[in-house]
Image (cartoon, rainbow, N blue to C red):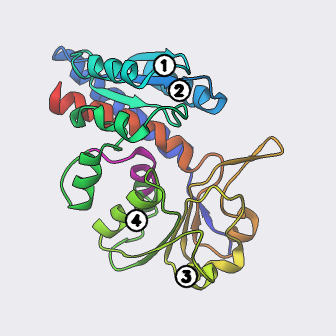
């Protein structure tokens, strides 16, 4: 029996319809959610992502501002821009598009964002709240992944979840979210010996490495939930971390690439921006 497809594109579209209604309600009381995206340099992938975020804002009725900055911008100048956005009442969410130019200290820039406007969930305050079970903004891709898992109808509590990847943006926060949902969590990474030993035991498997088709069907527990958080271009086509065809023969539920986790990321950014407007606007 083939795995059931987790259609992130459809789920994302359904969520956005509800978000539109929330925005209409906010506007009736004089509030319009506002998102600022800071883009330094001309990285082609980053430009595509930023355009996607602006398009989503326009579709939902969120006020958006894209600040396209020269790659040569100094650390001080970038901090000044972040401070201006922190003090701008029309802006409820600030997203600094990564990666930043090599000469910029990424950690310092992210920490200059007001945690109340940290809709990307990457400030140390947001990460600390996540780790200690407090309410705060959660990184968009991990947040979307948890929603996708829950919408399978399968319970997370008590399950063994294996996360392959340990990045600050995806691997670590999704592992923490799964732990907060009472899963037993194992984190694997590039130094893990005999990776398949762990992945075969996973009731929930989240692949977050950026290594195309690292996870094959013979590494998956029959009937498990497989979430593919990887996207890499190979010969002009997007590939996930999971070998989709072989995984479909074993898994119970699976996300495709594209059309799985990807659409949820921007939708969760929109959701976080609306939440920031509600709480602090």
Between discs 1 and 3, the one toward the N terminus: 1
Residue at x 69%, y 48% (from the top left corner) = 232
Between discs 4 and 3, the one toward the N terminus: 4
Asked whether the viewer can see residue 172, the reply is yes
As measured in the structure, the alpha-carbon distance from the residue carrying label 4 to the one carrying label 2 is 26 Å
As measured in the structure, the alpha-carbon distance from the residue carrying label 2 to the one carrying label 3 is 36 Å
The residue at which mark 1 appears reads as 73
The residue at which mark 3 appears reads as 198
Between discs 4 and 1, the one toward the N terminus: 1
Between discs 2 and 1, the one toward the N terminus: 2
Q: Are marks 4 and 3 in contact (CB under 8 Å)?
A: no
Residue at x 45%, y 18% (from the top left corner) = 58
- Mark identifier at residue 175: 4
As measured in the structure, the alpha-carbon distance from the residue carrying label 2 to the one carrying label 1 is 18 Å
Q: Which quadrant would residue 119 be assigned to in this image? A: top left
Measured from the top left, where is residue 88 in percent x and y?
24, 15
Which of these two is toward me, 135 or 156? 135
- 235 w.r.t. 209: above or below: above
- 168 w.r.t. 157: above or below: above
The residue at which mark 2 appears reads as 50
Front position among marks 4 and 1: 1
As measured in the structure, the alpha-carbon distance from the residue carrying label 4 to the one carrying label 3 is 15 Å
Between discs 4 and 2, the one toward the N terminus: 2
Is residue 142 one of those drawn in magenta?
Answer: yes
Circle 3 — which element? helix
Crowdedness near tag 2: few (<14), some (14–19) or many (≥20) residues, C-alpha within 10 Å? many
């Amino acid at each position: 029996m083939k795995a059931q497809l987790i259609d992130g594109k459809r789920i994302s579209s359904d969520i956005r319809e509800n978000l539109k209604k929330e925005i209409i309600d906010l506007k009736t009381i004089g509030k319009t959610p506002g998102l600022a995206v800071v883009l330094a340099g001309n990285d082609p992938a980053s430009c595509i992502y930023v355009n996607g975020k602006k398009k989503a804002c326009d579709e939902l009725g969120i006020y958006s501002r894209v600040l396209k900055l020269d790659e040569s911008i100094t650390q001080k100048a970038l901090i000044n821009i972040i401070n201006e956005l922190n003090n701008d009442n029309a802006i409820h969410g600030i997203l600094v598009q990564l990666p930043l130019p090599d000469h910029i200290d990424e950690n310092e820039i992210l920490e200059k964002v007001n945690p109340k406007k940290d809709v990307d969930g990457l400030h140390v305050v947001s990460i600390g709240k996540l780790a200690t079970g407090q309410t705060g903004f959660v990184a968009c891709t991990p947040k979307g992944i948890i929603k996708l898992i829950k919408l399978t109808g399968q319970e997370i509590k008590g399950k063994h979840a294996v996360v392959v990847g340990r990045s600050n943006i995806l691997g670590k926060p999704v592992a923490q979210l799964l732990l907060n949902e009472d899963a037993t969590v194992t984190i694997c990474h590039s130094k893990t010996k005999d990776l398949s030993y762990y992945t075969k035991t996973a009731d929930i498997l989240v692949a977050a490495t950026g290594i195309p088709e690292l996870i094959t069907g013979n590494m998956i527990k029959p009937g498990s939930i497989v979430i593919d958080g990887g996207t890499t271009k190979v010969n002009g086509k997007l590939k996930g971390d999971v070998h989709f065809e072989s995984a479909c023969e074993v898994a119970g539920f699976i996300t495709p690439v594209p059309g799985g986790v990807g659409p949820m990321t921007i939708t969760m950014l929109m959701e976080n921006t609306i939440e920031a407007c509600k709480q602090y606007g």
